């Protein structure tokens, strides 16, 4: 029986997401064990995350020149190699803050490469397997989200049972599995610039082409801008604001349930994207999803009991779920395949710029502002910006060919 290549790509996304999210548990743990300082753990994660902005912009050009499949394969191999450096160097020479930071930066710099390359393969794989592109975008994003749930849980369990050093070897194996799965996806696209020799100049040229194409498509650029804003707000609300609130209540288990509910909601929302797009135009669906996200954050400002908070977490995930597959699908429909890598690379670059900025800003604000008004104003700001951009900008002109939208169940 022939294995569908779409299964291989979705599983590669799941394993890579699991590996990346597991690293975000294992590295702070190792830093705490090595230095005894939670501040150092924050420095290592923050600086390594910030370093991504120097490589993320050129990833799309790299994909255009080398091809999405090779970049996906090698990005995960490099991630695996950087992960095992922690226990190897620790055993041979010992670790300190400087060595921890250098290794973390090496690994983080290639994080966007695999994710961007896999997104660039979605359309070609779906077409080869005869799948609905709309449905497969949802399936792909759901698989990636499941990986982000499995990774931290698996890392925490591994640290408990086999220790931190062995955990890094397990994470490396997960990255290698993602690489192997991508390896078995055949070369199914002829859209790489194979007639061009590999050079830094060609990589930057393809990157500029992708950026210019995205800039000229004002409706799509508006979506990317809103999506970037969503990322800058959504991620810190989850990691800083809510964690501060539940930590102050000494209810980490409730926080865990809320995060799990968010993830379940994202998976369900992504899988239902193909149904939602039948009833709403893309621009309207963007406005509805992002306005609902803002409304849920506003509702969280009233600090309800645990059950209602978990329900709001589920609602937040449901509203967020269709956004990523819709963004993928609109790029696929409005851009030629040879530009998918550069355009997705530009999108990732903006996200990686926005997330540290949002995290830093909210991290400073949350020290001096109480949680309820902060949540309310974050939600209100998000609603206001969404409605402003949605009804006065080019976002409402987002459209796709009606014949490409699924009519079946």
Image (spheres, rainbow, N blue to C red):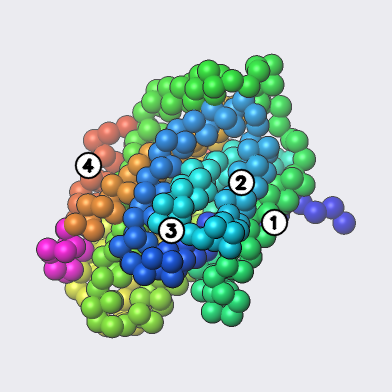
Question: Of label 3 and label 2, which has the lower sequence position?
Answer: 2
* Residue at 66% across, 26% down: 191
Question: Of label 4 and label 1, which has the lower sequence position?
Answer: 1
Q: Quote the CA–CA distance across marks 3 and 1.
A: 30 Å
Relative side of 48 to 378, left or right: right
Frontmost of labels 3 and 1 is 3
Q: Quote the CA–CA distance across marks 2 and 4.
A: 42 Å
* Residue at 59% across, 40% down: 117
Relative side of 136 to 238, left or right: right
Relative side of 397 to 401, left or right: left
Q: Nearer the viewer, residue 11 or 44?
A: 44
Q: SS at mark 1?
A: helix
The C terminus, quarter of image: bottom right
* Residue at 46% across, 52% down: 99
Q: Quote the CA–CA distance across marks 4 and 1.
A: 44 Å
Question: Of label 2 and label 1, which has the lower sequence position?
Answer: 2
Question: Of label 4 and label 3, which has the lower sequence position?
Answer: 3
Q: SS at mark 3?
A: loop
Q: Nearer the viewer, residue 20 or 133?
A: 20
What's drawn in magenta, residue-wise?
A: 365-379
Give the residue number, with chain letter if any, for mark 4: 388
Give the residue number, with chain letter if any, for mark 1: 177
| Residue 258, visible in the rendered structure | yes
Q: Quote the CA–CA distance across marks 3 and 2.
A: 22 Å
Give the residue number, with chain letter if any, for mark 2: 78
Give the residue number, with chain letter if any, for mark 3: 96
| Residue 408, visible in the rendered structure | no
């Amino acid at each position: 029986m022939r294995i569908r290549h779409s299964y291989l790509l979705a599983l590669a996304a799941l394993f890579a997401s699991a590996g990346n999210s597991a690293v975000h548990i294992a590295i702070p743990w190792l830093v705490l064990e090595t230095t005894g300082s939670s501040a150092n753990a924050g420095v290592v994660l923050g600086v390594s995350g910030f370093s991504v902005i120097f490589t993320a912009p050129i990833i799309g050009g790299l994909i255009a020149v080398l091809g999405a499949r090779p970049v996906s394969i090698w990005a995960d191999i490099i991630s695996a190699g950087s992960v095992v450096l922690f226990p190897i160097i620790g055993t041979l020479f010992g670790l300190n803050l400087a060595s921890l930071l250098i290794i973390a930066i090496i690994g983080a710099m290639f994080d966007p490469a695999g994710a961007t390359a896999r997104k660039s393969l979605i359309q070609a794989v779906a077409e080869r397997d005869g799948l609905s592109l709309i449905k497969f975008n949802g399936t792909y994003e759901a698989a990636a989200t499941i990986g982000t749930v499995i990774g931290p849980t698996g890392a925490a369990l591994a640290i408990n049972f086999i220790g931190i050093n062995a955990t890094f070897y397990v994470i490396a194996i997960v990255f290698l599995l993602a690489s192997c799965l991508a390896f078995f996806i055949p070369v199914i696209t002829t859209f790489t610039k194979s007639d061009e020799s590999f050079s830094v100049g060609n990589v930057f040229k393809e990157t500029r082409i992708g950026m210019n194409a995205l800039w000229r498509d004002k409706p799509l650029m508006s979506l990317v801008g809103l999506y970037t804003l969503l990322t800058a707000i959504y991620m810190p609300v989850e990691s800083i604001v809510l964690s501060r609130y539940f930590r102050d209540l000494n209810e980490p288990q409730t926080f865990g349930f809320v995060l799990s509910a968010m993830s379940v909601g994202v998976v369900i929302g992504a899988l239902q994207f193909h149904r939602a797009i039948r009833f709403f135009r893309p621009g309207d669906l963007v406005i509805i999803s992002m306005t609902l996200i803002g409304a849920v954050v506003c509702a969280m400002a009233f600090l309800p009991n645990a059950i209602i908070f978990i329900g709001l977490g589920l609602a937040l995930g449901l509203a967020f779920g269709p956004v990523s597959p819709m963004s993928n699908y609109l790029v696929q429909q409005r851009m030629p395949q040879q530009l998918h890598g550069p355009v997705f690379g530009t999108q990732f670059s903006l996200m990686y710029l926005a997330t540290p900025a949002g995290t830093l800003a909210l991290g400073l604000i949350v020290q001096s502002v109480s949680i309820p008004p902060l949540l309310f104003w974050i939600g209100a700001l998000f609603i206001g910006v969404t409605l402003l951009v949605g009804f006065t900008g080019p976002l409402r002109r987002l459209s796709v060919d009606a014949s490409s939208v699924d009519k079946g169940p």
